[in-house]
Image (spheres, coloured by chain):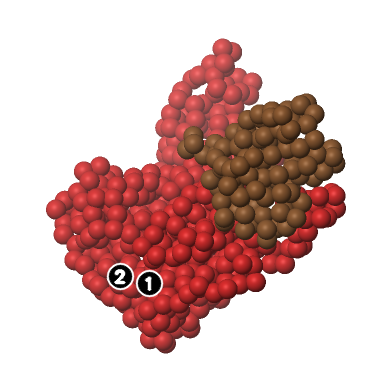
Amino acid sequence: MDDRRFGAQVVEAPDDVRVRMHGDLDSRADESLSTAYEAVKALGQDRMTLDFNEVGYINSTGIALVVRLLAEARRDGRGVRAIGLTPHYREIFRITRLSDFMDIIEGDAA
Amino acid sequence: MTALSRPIRRLLGRNDAALDSAPASGSEPEPIVPEASADLELSASIAVEIPESDPLLAYLQSAPGPVDVARLELDSPAVQGLRDAGVALVVPLVSQGELIGTLNLGPRLSEQEYSTDDRRLLTTLAAQAAPAIRVAQLVREQANEAAERERLAQELRVATLIQQQFLPRHLPQLPQWQVAAYYGPARAVGGDFYDFVEMPDGRIGIAVGDVTDKGVPAALVMARTHSVLRAEASRSTSPGEILSRANDLLEPEMPAKMFVTCLFAILDPTTGHIVIANAGHNLPFVRSGDEVAEIRATGMPLGLMPGIRYEETEGVIGPDSNVLLYSDGLIEAHDDNREMFGFDRLREAMRIDDAGSELLDRLLETLNAFTGTDREQEDDITLVTLRRSAGVAEHEAAGSTALTAFSLPGIQGNEREAMDRVAAALADLGLPEDRLERLKTAVSEAAMNAIEYGSQGNEEVPFEVDVTVTPTDVVVRVTDRAMSGAVPKDPETPDIERKLVGEQKPRGWGLFLIEHMVDAMDVSADEEAGTQTVTLRLAREETNDG
């Protein structure tokens, strides 16, 4: 379904860059997410916010994409935080210990 | 054999002569001289038939040299034929003791008899020509045989191709049932077929059939019958009605002297209830304990006459029991003494309780031991067996309810479809939201494993999901084809710190997530299938993970 197709929009804010994602975060999100991070790097901010408000489904491949993104950001000296995760996916970020390496903000407040 | 019918040609000096070749072992005679060219004058063209029983053949075989037809004293129609054709002298052409042709000469134009020198020359000529002619004959025969073999091989390839197109690519995955099938074509490829059909009411239809005749004609009728049965099975849930309608459609178009035997069974996998109708096919055997019994149902084969009604017989395949459907290639196989394998041997071989493919392996081993492995298979052999495991009874006793079972193509993205369908099936169960989300993630990950390891992303290789609820648990089984082996039971534990520094690949979270999402998980596999079972307790439990 179209509303499940992953997409990512990069929006610049005064003190960070927000990656607004929508759709299913699975293996098909690979290219969009890579492109989005290239845009983040081009903007040069040292903080990135991953916005999961419009993401309804994340599977283990999606988790792997987030891990890759986080690794790149850390190499680039860029801080990462996540907003808009449902309680279930916050739980998964906790179990996988992703939450140890990024700030998990409850709700959608930036 | 043995029709010597060649024109007499002027070959030697001014003599009329003809070369005829005796056919070798049943083949048609080969012309030895080229077809008439401009400088070869045809003086006559008379057929000289020499039947195999004619004493002339034996006479010429042992004659030391040219034979005067006029002096032959044989009670032989062929001799008379030679005389009528104006043949004066017959020179036998013998190669390696075998008469391979004759050189037929008319009278000398000088009206003198053939001289001793003539005869010596002809004898020498015959002795030198015969081996060369024989070689030419053999080359021609081999070319003809090769062409015929190629034609038969091509027909065989076409028939096999048609046959294979219509055999099921996958067996149905039925919870608590072991399904196995075998199709072994004879060299000439008969018209056996089997099929599994998902019925509109959720039961499973099983067809086993046999078209009379072999090769392409049988394969085409098989293909048509297969299609008709499938179409009718989508319109009716009565096996008798399905066969009756199929018969009415097939009868007008059935080639002469052909018909189709077919057994159609409909099985309810949740109860083991089976209904069969039979169009002249072998009766299925049901084994329960060490008792083996037939399910009897009779009816006329498909395609013989219209308006046939087929009776239905019902039964129940109990826990630890199985049913076998088969074609007559099994029971009509012969040993070296021309004794048939027969029903009694089959019945005896079925007494042992073997699951699925093991039963088929044992049946085929028993058959091979009977016929001898060197013996060419006479007819197609088709075997289909369904065994109900004891687990059904255990679950029934425990009040187990099957909520849903479905199959999906093994392509990425369908893990989400599997997850949503399981969630829909559990909608009325009232699971707490967080528990349901955990199960959904576990199902999605198990389905991803099935797609990756079981189907290797091949759309043609599906995976199956079934959901059962007991008074205490929700049990979801994801079964795949284990194309690249089993899902690894103990993969490397994912470590986020190592992943972030590149010491581990970013992936590898699947089984880790399943284990942390549900209360129990199990991975098992054999050569044919891999199964991941995830269990979620219905009562809320505090877990280490949250």
Three-letter amino acid code at the position of disc 2: Ile
Q: Chain of mark 1?
A: B
Q: Which chain is the one coloured brown?
A: A
Work out whether B4 lies above or below B445.
above
Residue at (23% x, 71% y) in the render: B313
Dot 2, crowdedness within 10 Å: few (<14), some or many (≥20)? many
Image location of residue B515, percent across then percent down: 63, 66
Work out whether B154 lies above or below B270.
above
Three-letter amino acid code at the position of disc 1: Thr
Quarter of the view holding residue B385: bottom left
Residue B450 appears in view = no
Q: Which disc, if any, is residue B401?
A: 1
Work out whether A32 lies above or below B250.
above
Most foreground residue, B124 or B423 = B423
Image location of residue B114, percent across then percent down: 61, 31
Residue at (69% x, 29% y) in the render: A13
Q: With B505 as the anchor, is B378 left or right in this view?
A: left
Q: Which disc, if any, is residue B274?
A: 2
Residue at (33% x, 73% y) in the render: B271
**Mark 1 / mark 2, whichever is N-terminal:** 2
